Amino acid sequence: MESAEYHSALAALAWQIELGADESVSDSPVDRYGVPAAVVKPAAAPAASAGMPAPVQEVDLVAVARATAEAAQDIDGLRAALMGFDHCDLKLGARNLVFSDGAPGARVMIITETPTRDEDREGRPFAGRAAQLLDKMLGAIDLSRESSVYIASVLPWRTPQDRDPKSEEIAMLLPFLQRHIALAQPDVLVLMGNQTCQALLGKRGITRLRGEWVEVLGKPALPMFHPEQLMRTPVAKRDAWADLLSIKAKLGNG
């Protein structure tokens, strides 16, 4: 290199260093205004990579309950299916399964409300004073739970603190109740109380609903006051008597 060129190059380098350019980046120039080539994105990682748990699949508990209930071929099989059904948290806090009482195959099937503390303790629907009143009511129209009435609960387990059942609890256990009715094959259904009407009719307001025959699962059904309500409101016993006579007339016409 000529001496003049050498000194010119050295001066230019010193000037660049003074400006802050103290590192060589590339031997070839870079076009900062050019369009860059398309960037290839890395493939998405699989949902369940090594060491990571797979996402939990939600289970349709209503569908599980329906399949379990439909598999029962008789009432004893349905009881066993409920005993083995572990998807309802109510089972964890209850003492006993409250499944049924009375005479299977009877013409009249009473569906009563969620079990109370007494019913949970005894493991059968209707207990204590409510049972005594029910027996008197049935006897007034020549019926009895021992020979001519079959009884089931809208839910088979007591709720905490006897609260009203939640809609999801009713929905989960409804297939078992529907299968219970199908297996029992009654001529007449009696729906006692608001909870029962909510489950089988999708309605509440027993004062408005009582006394009017409706159809449930292809069977005539009569909403009626629960004996517990009759004990709290004795004046309603007149309406209950009218409903009992209506049941007797329906059986007589059957």
Image (tube, helix red, strand yellow):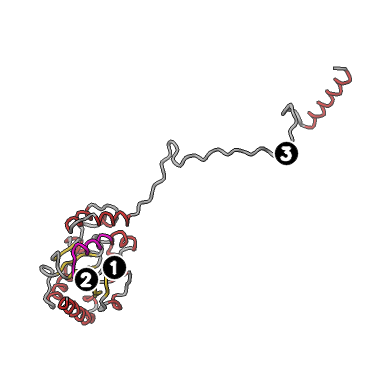
Q: Residue at x 25, y 63 (%)?
A: 178
**For the stretch drawn in magenta, what is the main secondary structure?**
helix
Check the image and report above or below for 113 versus 95.
Answer: below
Residue, disc 1: 200
Residue type at numbered disc 2: Leu
x, y percentage for residue 207?
Answer: 29, 78
Residue, disc 2: 189
Which quadrant would the C terminus be assigned to in this image? bottom left
The magenta region covers 175-189
Q: Is residue 44 magenta?
A: no
**Between marks 2 and 1, how big is the CA–CA gap?**
11 Å
Callout 2–callout 1 Cβ contact below 8 Å:
yes
- State which quadrant residue 179 falls in: bottom left
- State which quadrant residue 10 falls in: top right
Label 1 neighbour load within 10 Å: few <14, some 14-19, many 20+? some
Q: Nearer the viewer, residue 251 or 124?
A: 251
**Between marks 3 and 2, how big is the CA–CA gap?**
83 Å
Q: Residue at x 82, y 29 (%)?
A: 15
Q: Counting residues from the N terminus, which is met first, the one under dot 3 or under dot 1?
A: 3
Point out which mark residue 34 bears: 3
Secondary structure at badge 3 equals loop
